[in-house]
Image: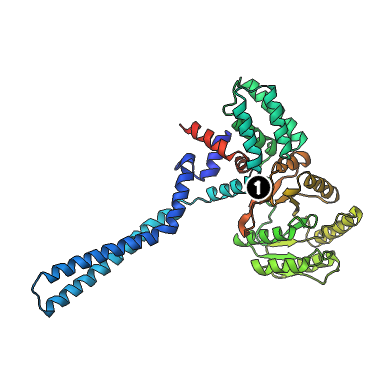
Amino acid sequence: MSFFKRLKEKLTGNPTEEKVEQIGEEQSSELQLEDSAEPALLETTNVEVEEKIEQTAVSDDSDDSDDSDDAVVSDSSQEVVEQEQQHEVQEIAVVEEPVKEKKPSAWSITQKFKAGLEKTRNSFTSKVNDLVARYRKVDEDFFEELEDLLLQADVGFETVMELMDKLRFEVQRKNIKDTNGIQTIISEKLVEIYEQGEEDLIDLNMQPNGELTVILFVGVNGVGKTTTIGKLAHRLKSEGKTVVLAAGDTFRAGAIDQLQVWGDRVGCEVIKQSEGSDPAAVMYDAIRAAKNRKADVLICDTAGRLQNKVNLMNELEKVHRVISREIPNAPHEVLLALDATTGQNALVQAQTFKEVTNVTGIVLTKLDGTAKGGIVLAIRNKLHIPVKFVGLGEKMDDLQPFDAERYVYGLFAEGLDKELQNSEK
């Protein structure tokens, strides 16, 4: 399936019913309609009612009528008002119903990626647009400048070299002479490099109903690990899961209280002990509590210090041993939280944690706060660890499952929109 076709399906949610180039305008007008349709309709209807009442009153004054006639007119006016109010309710219902149906979640998720990658797009893609505008033909000078731009976006040396090889081959294979449509080819190859033929990379390893799923979070202090745990708990609860949190970061001052705040916010029980307690003992208590409460998911926080790798390794190993002893094959997921704003330093952290524990997925936080969003590709291609979630904002639902097509669209939104529109003509 071509990149354009996949992109169209993800943007629209149902590509057979609406065109991608129409969504931007229609969605904007629909959102405005949702906010303004009802007041405007009420105002219009009320004016019509008043005009009809006035017309009735004028007609009434021109006739020589007695008190009984006045009563009839009053009843008639009241009847007009009631009919118009009923009509008004029916009209509002007609207006509101299609608005709800025309708000596909696929579009709103795509918009989150587009908004979350705005800083990267403004710094990186604007330069790519300038490059495409300056070069009328695709030659070696064009590739060299494109290579520099990708490196500046922290895509990573190995990833950039692989991309350049793929681009050169594709340009030669298709005998491409000019830069028209080159952003589409770049986007397609970036997605190919990320996915590398693998499927369902973002899916969490959730256990069957009735069994407890254990998710272990690791990461250095300050990357937004606790906040991410809270947002993931909120996401799982919204899917109908019962979630319990384990405050295993007993080393950092305030970490237990911070997790408790998130537990209260999302409505999850937090299993904790006093500061300085043995993290493995906290995990043991948390597993017992989660089993007793027949919880679906247990999310475990851990300490994030890297000053002494040996201590970190020993602590995580002990925690892992306790969890697997109580629940065979657990933890089912070991998610590493990384701060996207740290760029290549996040890659170093990922390498370190991969050495001390079996990381099954990356949660990349603060992607909306960096101009170097290319680190997603560097992590995936260098470490072969999938990015399962990305943080695209401060709101509770801004933690989104990573999606390669939406991510690349977020990087090249304006250019791809134009090329996508041209492909539909």
Q: Residue at x 61, y 19 (%)?
A: 175
Q: Residues within 10 Å of mark 1 (few under 14, many from 20)?
A: many
Q: Is residue 330 visible?
A: no
**169 relative to 133 in the view: left or right:** right
Residue tagged by mark 1?
402
Q: Residue at x 71, y 35 (%)?
A: 150
Residue drawn at 57 percent across, 47 percent down: 110
Among all residues in the image, which is located at the extreme left? Answer: 64
Q: Identify which amino acid the numbered label 1 is placed on.
A: Phe
Residue 75 horizontal/vertical position (percent): 20, 74
Marker count (numbered) = 1
Asked whether 223 or 386 is in front, the reply is 223
Q: Is residue 131 above or below residue 224?
A: above
Decide which of 6, 151 is in the foreground and name it.
Answer: 151
Which quarter of the rendered picture does the N terminus lie within? top right
Q: Where is residue 364 drawn, in percent x and y?
A: 71, 50
User: Which quadrant would residue 86 be assigned to in this image?
Assistant: bottom left
Residue 382 visible: yes
- The quarter of the rendered structure image containing the C terminus is top left
Classify residue 55 as left or right of residue 9: left
Q: Whole-percent x and y of residue 66?
A: 10, 78
Q: How is the image coloured?
A: rainbow
Q: Nearer the viewer, residue 12 or 236?
A: 12
Of all residues, the one furthest to the bottom in this rendering is: 67
Q: Secondary structure at mark 1?
A: loop
Up/down of 136 relative to 419, above or below: above
Residue 214, compared with residue 177, is above or below; it is: below
| Residue 257, horizontal then vertical, whole percent | 75, 69
